[in-house]
Amino acid sequence: MGLTARDMSDMGRLAQLAANPQDTTREEIYLAIASLYRVQGAHLNARERELMHDILRRLTSDVEMTIRIALAERLSEDTTAPHDLIMLLADDRIEVARPVILRSPLLSDEDMLRLVAECSSSHQEAVASRANISEPITEALSRCETETVLVALVRNVTAKISSTVYESLVEKSQHLSGLQDPLARRTDLPADLATRMCGWVSDALKTYIVQNYAVEARRLDEAFAHAETVVKNEPAPPKSPPAEGASKLIEKLAVAGQLKAGFLLRVLHQSQIDLFDLAFARLVDLPLGELRQWLYEKGPKGVALACRAVGIDRCVFGTVFNLSRQARMMKPTLTASEVMEVEAVFSSFSKPAAMAEIHTR
């Protein structure tokens, strides 16, 4: 069944009103178009769907959030709503997006993976809280660096989490204390990983793990011994200059176009500080000595500018700052004024501007 002449007339009238509201409010136009889209979505051709989607997108910023939230709540469990309309709401501010992300049966794994990759940490947290999310989604979420997202994932008892992802989360719990308790209380956490956590969690949580997991005394002693060794034995200091092999690897990756910000995070998590410094220097096109001055002598603002210059997001800054400082036996602490300086860098400097700032000082 196609659209009637009356439907086509209504659509044309709504398009005109969107461009020139006259005596009709934008909220009324938004709801009218959304209603028509919802009822007739299955019968629209590609051009008509594109037109209605474009009108709604243009109106979104001018429509009161309460109206958009009400629409999202109404459609959050509607199995007949147009997928385009659901995704428009899911891409909106988190207050609007949350009910759709949490409950819409129309969101596919591909949709949620896109939200995790492209949207805010608040959207990621909503995805992490959605019932029965699959292993590909939990794996993508586990790569996030925002603690609230990871905690939401671990607290979601219906989330399907693989042993590989659990291993990654357990490792992160060494530095993110908020993860430790909800992780230990997961009934599907592998016992060997729970045992490993005994090396760094509180005494109360150690007791819980021992009482609720089949932990052998020998393995528990091994976990404590390993933790004690890590604390007592300082990691090897960075080499200056780094080994020739490290320099060749970085140059090879750069020539092949494979040297990217993600590589920095990977080697930093692996405590390969020489590779981290070399790769960072190559990415910002500075001699190694000057790069190390930026990272380790110019304070948190210098680190923030370097991160911004290579495209590292603000939410990952803390990880870079903390791990790079720890690798050089420096205290990873920030004063209130330094936090403000870091925030100012990420809000005020574009990637090219941050790069230019580094090269003009």
Image: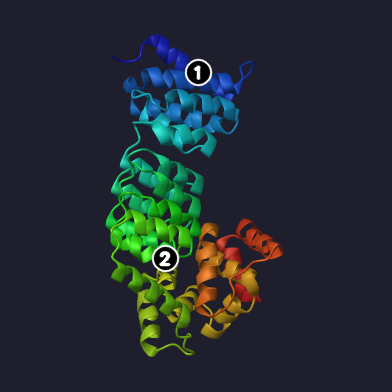
Q: Residue at x 60, y 28 (%)?
A: 64
* Residue on which disc 1 sits: 32
User: In the depicted view, which residue is nearer to us: 152 or 34?
Assistant: 152
- In the rendered image, residue 20, in percent from the top left (x then y), is placed at 60, 22
**Disc 1 to disc 2, how far (Cα)?**
45 Å
Name the foreground residue: 196 vs 114: 196
Report the quarter where the C terminus lies: bottom right
- Residue at 44% across / 61% down in the picture? 173
Q: Position of residue 209 (x, y in %)?
A: 37, 57
In the image, which disc is placed on residue 342? Answer: none
Circle 1 SS class: helix
Q: Is residue 304 at all visible to an observer of this figure?
A: yes
Question: Label 1 amino acid?
Answer: Ala
Foreground of the two, 15 or 149:
149
Q: Is residue 223 above or below residue 240?
A: above
| Horizontal and vertical percent position of residue 113 | 36, 46
**Amino acid identity at mark 2:** Gly
Residue 93 shows up from this direction: no
Q: Quadrant of the N terminus?
A: top left
Mark 2, residues whose alpha carbon is within 10 Å: few (<14), some, or many (≥20)? few
- Looking at the image, is mark 1 or mark 2 nearer the viewer? 2
Query: Residue 357, image x and y in percent?
Result: 63, 70
Compared with 85, 307 (above or below) is below
